[in-house]
Amino acid sequence: MMSTTGTFITFEGGEGAGKTTAIALLKQQLEELGVNVLVTREPGGIPIAERIRDVILDTSHTSMDPRTEALLYAAARRQHLVEKVIPALKEGNIVLCDRFVDSSLVYQGFARGLGMDAVEEINAFAVQETVPELTFWLDLNPVVGLARINANDSRELNRLDQESMSFHLKVREGYKRLASKHPDRIQLIDASVSKEEIVKQMIDILREKTRILGK
């Protein structure tokens, strides 16, 4: 990764895994410990990327080609990095990002069948040397995750929520493969437990794996 004083942490998981809630709670705990934290998301985080997000996740865009989808994610990712993530890291912030390259590798590369290597090449061009120091993978049975979504009227519904159960099972399998490939960076979080226990798992890993909490 580029030379910065901040720490880049990403969050991954299938639909309904609870990433947004977990990130908010972790941010609160870290700030109580005196850590400067920036929370952002992909696709989005800045105006240009949010516009691209609208195109990607529009429920009427069911005809979108998988390669188009992968390229749009990479484009949004690049602009987000340049405008928001890299400057925050250079200022010494802890950046907590909801999704990053791993999502593209899993959703487009594995679940949609484009190939993880092909999608990785697209994103290598987009992100250059910017990679997360740590990734939390919130693992949850897709049946449970989709049930959570259906029960939550306030959650943003998007095109990915409309995919078949077989697609979501492939997503979970893709994350398992990535975690096996990058065991030091990708840390498994059991997302079936309470939100308090999820954050406790994260704090314990941060103490062990990073300098954020005094390693």
Image (cartoon, helix red, strand yellow):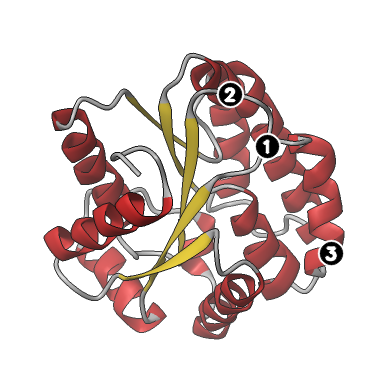
Q: Amino acid at mark 1?
A: Met
Q: Are marks 2 and 3 in contact (CB under 8 Å)?
A: no
189 relative to 66 in the view: left or right: left
Q: Indicate the quadrant where residue 23 lies.
A: top left
User: Which residue lies under the disc numbered 1?
Assistant: 1
User: What label does residue 80 carry, if any?
Assistant: none
Q: Which residue is mark 3?
A: 117
Please name whichever residue, 133 or 107, is drawn nearer the observer in this view of the structure: 133
**Callouts 1 and 3 close, C-beta under 8 Å:** no
The N terminus - image quarter: top right
Query: Closer to the observer: label 1 or label 3?
Result: 1
Residue located 34% across and 50% down the image? 206
- Left or right: 168 with respect to 68? left
Q: Amino acid at mark 2?
A: Thr
Q: Front-most of 210 and 13?
A: 210
Element at label 2: loop
Cα–Cα gap, marks 2 and 1: 8 Å
Disc 2, disc 1: CB below 8 Å? yes
- Viewer-nearest of labels 2 and 3? 2
Residue 4: mark:
2
Q: Within 10 Å of the Cα at label 1, are there few (<14), some (14-19), or many (20+) other Cα atoms?
A: few
The residue at 16%/65% (across/down) is 197
Q: Position of residue 37 (x, y in %)?
A: 33, 27
Report the residue at 65% width, 50% height from top. 101
Q: Position of residue 213 (x, y in %)?
A: 29, 40
Rendered position, 187 above or below 78 = below
Element under disc 1: loop
